[in-house]
Image (cartoon, rainbow, N blue to C red):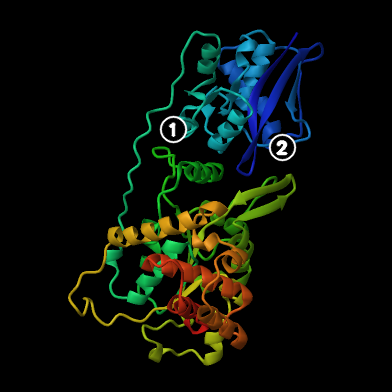
Amino acid sequence: MGLARAWSVALFGVDGVAVEVEADIGAGLPAVRLVGLPDAALQQAKERVRAAVRNSGEQWPAHRITLGLSPAALPKGGSGYDLAIACAILAAAKAIPADVLDGFALIGELALDGRVRPVRGVLPGLLAARRAGLSEAIVPAEALPEAGLVDGMRVFGAHRLDEVLACLRGEHSLETPPERAPAKRTSAVDLADVLGQPEARWALEVAAAGGHHLLFVGPPGTGKTMLAQRLCGLLPELTPEQALEVTAIHSVAGALAADAPLIDSPPFVAPHHSLSVPAMVGGGTGLAKPGAVSRAHRGVLFLDEACEFGPHRLETLRTALEEGEVRLARRDGVVRYPARFQLVLATNPCPCAPPRDTECLCPPNARRRYLARLSGPLLDRVDIRVRMRPLTAMSACDGSEPEPTSVVRERVQEARRRAAHRWSAYGLGSNAEVPGTVLRRDFPLAREAIELLDHGLDIGVVTGRGADRCLRVAWTLADLAGLDKPGVDEVASALEFRDRRSA
């Protein structure tokens, strides 16, 4: 007879809550009862833990066992509680010291033979455990590189349950995280690989400097995908806080690489046009999992052949583009996933997509219906639109070599530094994040520049939202030019980027 407790973590999106796992061994027929709103996978933990304990050479208590997971009103799911449940039961049975479990977070699934298997969400789970005051953690050995990203906690890795029990008894030491290798930014793609397309290259530079959304329209083979793939090389490295935030999302999605768990560069996510709506924004039963928009957080979401995605999937992007997050309501609750990304769309101008427009066989109505899949409200949130032309030569006319990524990145970084200094008082990092009210109230432009926007609004070229986005692009153009504030030329160029004929 006895009572003991251990600690694990419940995840809600990328947020975690420390869960107290209590085990009470009392009188009665041998049975195991699990309370605390467990899902089906957690209910099955009773059988997994029983077999793992026996196959690890330990005696399973032949009494009535009650397991309580607190907070009791919080829905809990998954197999990550197995290790904590096993240790709590054995501590209640006096097989291991009960007091040694205080301050330990235990995360891991148990195989029937006692192996400790990896689970998703180790990084956000340990961040939540640290916030709850827990100072040590035991995780699956495969998750040690990921767990080692959490500062301020002693983290250990185990391959088997008997190793964990020996460590808690003071008989054996567990693995510790490996040394973090210094981050090296390497990329196999470079802007110098792109032939021609000076307008599109300039638009890509402006988009990188200000964090703006981008649309490429042009026939196949003109370099739309190549340019989009090179955008991440122009963006700045993630800060340590941003890197942990992005890594936590990928951990919950189960998309972390074991050899390099920390994501310190902007991610590039390019889903196929056949993906479902839950795969785009997140979904699943119980609690929703992150989708493509969240995995692209702080990076680039590239939708190639955008018109093939269909209006239903594309329209789900509108809220994320405006708010920088998605909120998903499912049976077990509402989860929030960050989704502040740069959207890059690429599409052909028509269904037949010939190399040159003069060879197009589509009737005008077919072309209009095809491009109408990109709705007005979605396009209104895209700051820069570029019409790409077919290549006419395999070499530059003037004999000069295309600029490589490293040269363009220097200009982009300088423009980003100017913007970050200007918006630091507002807690913002790029021009694309600045609300229109701040631009109009605190950073007014010259009357001549505003008159251009007024004329665009009057003739219906831009909407109110579009006018605010033109102001943001104009500030980015000024940053690239080293100007203190945009003038008439910058506002005119921003309006040209939103020319509806580019779509």
- Point out residue 348 in the picture as x, y percentages from the top left corner: 45, 78
Residue that carries the numbered disc 1 in the rendered image? 145
Residue closer to the observer: 94 or 40: 94
Q: Secondary structure at mark 2?
A: loop
- Tell me, yes or no, whether the two marked residues, 1 and 2, touch with CB atoms within 8 Å: no
Q: Residue at x 32, y 62 (%)?
A: 408
In the image, 143 versus 111, the foreground residue is: 143
Residue 217 on image: x %, y %: 45, 77
The disc labelled 2 sits on which kind of residue?
A: Asp
Q: Nearer the viewer, mark 1 or mark 2?
A: 1
Which circle marks residue 170 in the picture? none
Tell me if I can see residue 134 in this picture: yes
Q: Give the residue number, with chain letter if any, for mark 2.
A: 39
Residue shown at 55% from the left, 14% from the top: 165
Q: Is residue 399 above or below residue 329?
A: below
Q: Look at the numbered disc 1 and give the secondary structure of its residue.
A: helix
Q: Quadrant of the N terminus?
A: top right
Residue beneath the point at 60% across and 18% down: 53
Give the Cα distance between marks 1 and 2.
29 Å
Asked if residue 59 can be seen in this view, the reply is: no
At label 1, the amino acid type is Pro
On screen, 102 above or below 242? above
Outermost residue, left direction?
A: 399
First along the sequence among labels 1 and 2: 2
Q: Residue 91, how many percent across, how many down?
A: 65, 12
Picture quadrant where residue 8 is located: top right
Packing grade of label 1 (10 A; few <14, some 14-19, many >=20) is many
Q: Residue 97 at x, y = what percent?
A: 62, 9
